[in-house]
Amino acid sequence: MRLSGFTIARNVVKYNYPILESINSILPICDEFVVNVGDSEDDTLAIIRSIKDEKIRIIENKWDMSKGSEVLSTQTNLALKACRGKLAFYLQSDEVVHEDDLQRIKKVIDRNIDNEEVDAFRFYWFHFYGSYYRYRIDGGWYQKQDRIIRNSGEIESYGDAYGFRRKDESELRRVNTQCFIYHYGWVQPQDIMTQRRVNAEKIGFVSLDTDKKNDKYNYGDLNRFPPYFGNHPKVMTEKVKSHQMSQNDLSLINQEFWWHPMKIFHVRYKTFNRVRKKIE
């Protein structure tokens, strides 16, 4: 088996994770897809079971929340352990791959799958924020990370599961796919975003003031972030159309940047002029 996809899923309905879109975005190039489903307060398991594809393999686990943020890497590693492919493609449940990138990813895999000197395959990131047409490049938002790894037993997820490392602590040997991961975790209705932040505090990611736990999340002025002129993965079409804040923002972007060639041709472009200081 060449390529396994894998992810973890818990309370994806309650917190509005685009898990089906995430899985389906790379399912065409995977030989199997392992979903580690945690003990949930909603219909997460039923949602995963609704994917009628023989590539899907479900394992179930109870999350030990006493581990704090490391519960995510613990569960990610359990999913990885169940993978049978030479390579394993990890997507978190709010990350999606564009269909136009699949053939490029497949070609990079074909060139390197038998090269034991390659441990990992790196991607660039679109961290969308508040709107499907704004993304963050300021400090604290990583802009590249590994998502395909060699399934050798020598590589593991760590910390809050945002990346991978070799167990012997030597540096990962990687190639760059030149493709993007579309991260949608911060494009949510304001009340759901508040719930997600409160949940993040319970896990141990953040510490919130009382008012931030009770008020609707405030994205602030979206104009302080770069506009996105390209299209989104087709699997996200309905979510993008139904998100009112994004549609309002798109109208403003169209008015201000009507002349911009990137907008006219819907180029999937991202500026790499990093803002080093974190924007509040």
Image (cartoon, helix red, strand yellow):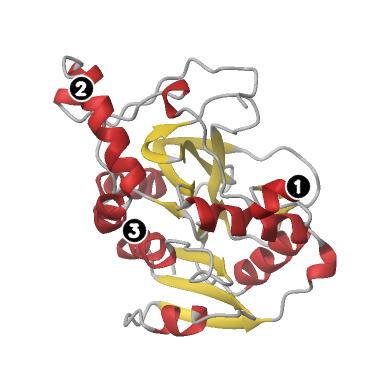
Q: Which mark is residue 208?
A: 1
Residue 273 spot, x, y in % from top left: 48, 15
For marks 1 and 2 on the same chain, the one whose residue lies earlier in the sequence: 1
Q: What's the amino acid at mark 1?
A: Leu
Can you tell which of label 3 and label 2 is closer to the viewer?
2
Quadrant housing the C terminus: top right
> How far is the residue under mark 3 from the one under mark 1?
34 Å
Separation of residues labelled 3 and 2 (CA atoms): 31 Å
Q: Which structural element holds mark 1? A: loop
Give the image location of residue 144, x and y in percent.
54, 34
Q: Which residue is mark 3?
A: 25
**Residue at (69% x, 53% y) in the render:** 213
Amino acid type of the residue that numbered disc 2 sits on in the rendered structure? Gln
Q: Residue at x 36, y 83 (%)?
A: 50
Mark 2 Cα shell of 10 Å, populated few (<14), some (14-19), many (≥20):
few
Does 6 sit left or right of 103 as displayed?
A: right
Quarter-of-image position of residue 139: top right
* Percent x, y of residue 16: 47, 63
Q: Quadrant of the N terminus?
A: bottom left
The image quadrant that residue 277 belongs to is top right
User: Any mark on residue 220, and which?
Assistant: none
Q: Name, please, the residue furthest toward the right.
A: 66
97, 80: nearer the viewer: 97
Find residue 255 and name its label. 2
Does label 3 or label 2 sit earlier along the sequence? 3
- Residue shown at the point (72%, 37%) measured from the top left: 171
- Helix, strand or loop at label 2? It is helix
Q: Nearer the viewer, mark 3 or mark 1?
A: 1
Give the residue type that dot 3 points to. Answer: Ser
